[in-house]
Image (tube, helix red, strand yellow):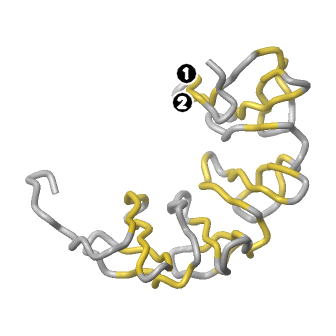
Amino acid sequence: DMQGRTVIDMVFEQAGTFHEGLAGVQERGFHGFIDRSGKFVIPPIFYDSWGYFSEGLAPVMLESPGGLWGYIDRESRFMILPRFGNAWDFEDGLALVTVSTGDGFINREGFSVVEPGKFAELGHFSEGLAPVKVDGKWGYDDRDGALLPAGYNSAGSFRHTVASRTPGWSG
């Protein structure tokens, strides 16, 4: 805590940060989620879960390496069934996911909003825009699929109207 006292015993192999009142932890090689008292809210039954809860959902992998990712709610129910090669946290109502055809975005119901493979590379949506790479240059895609002019060597996600670095950042 703020006074330097141990609030949750250091008994986990790995631990993430708290989001929406829960933190992902690893115990005996499996991942689950604890509350602020250190008690499991979601038992460690997932092979991987290094995402965190955002907008009420968390990305998890149920099977061993090479398994598929889906999204659970706080009661450990799959709200979006595992079908992704990789999955990230929700932001602005959308999550970046990977399938065999590439990266794309889904909404909270699991439907594609930006079809996987549409862009060579892309970053996370923030403030209604996502950085995307088209023909070797970066631009921005809005939530309705309209592409703002692509012509930049790098682009970042918007945070309070200021772009921050993305995976494609080259500067």
Rendering coords of residue 126 (x, y %): 62, 37
Residue nearer the viewer, 120 or 131: 120
Q: Quadrant of the C terminus?
A: top right
Q: What is the distance, in whole Å, between disc 1 and disc 2 at their CAs?
A: 5 Å
Residue nearer the viewer, 3 or 54: 3
Decide: few, some or many residues near mark 2? Use Cα within 10 Å; few <14, some 14-19, many ≥20: few
SS for tag 1? strand
Residue placed under numbered mark 2 in the picture? 159
Residue under the point 61% across and 82% down: 77
Labels 1 & 2 near each other (Cβ < 8 A)? yes
* Residue 135, above or below 98: above
Rendering coords of residue 93 (x, y %): 65, 51
* Residue 25, above or below 20: below
Instruction: Say what amino acid the circle numbered 1 marks.
Output: Val
Specify the quadrant of the image occupied by residue 51. bottom right
Instruction: Say what amino acid the circle numbered 2 marks.
Output: Arg
Specify the quadrant of the image occupied by residue 8. bottom left
Rendering coords of residue 116 (x, y %): 86, 50
Q: In which quarter of the image is the N terminus?
A: bottom left
Rendering coords of residue 135 (x, y %): 91, 25
Residue nearer the viewer, 145 or 171: 171
Left or right: residue 153 versus residue 124 is right
Residue under the point 77% across and 39% down: 143
Residue under the point 68% across and 23% down: 155
Residue placed under numbered mark 1 in the picture? 162
SS for tag 2? strand
Decide: few, some or many residues near mark 1? Use Cα within 10 Å; few <14, some 14-19, many ≥20: few
Residue under the point 37% across and 72% down: 13
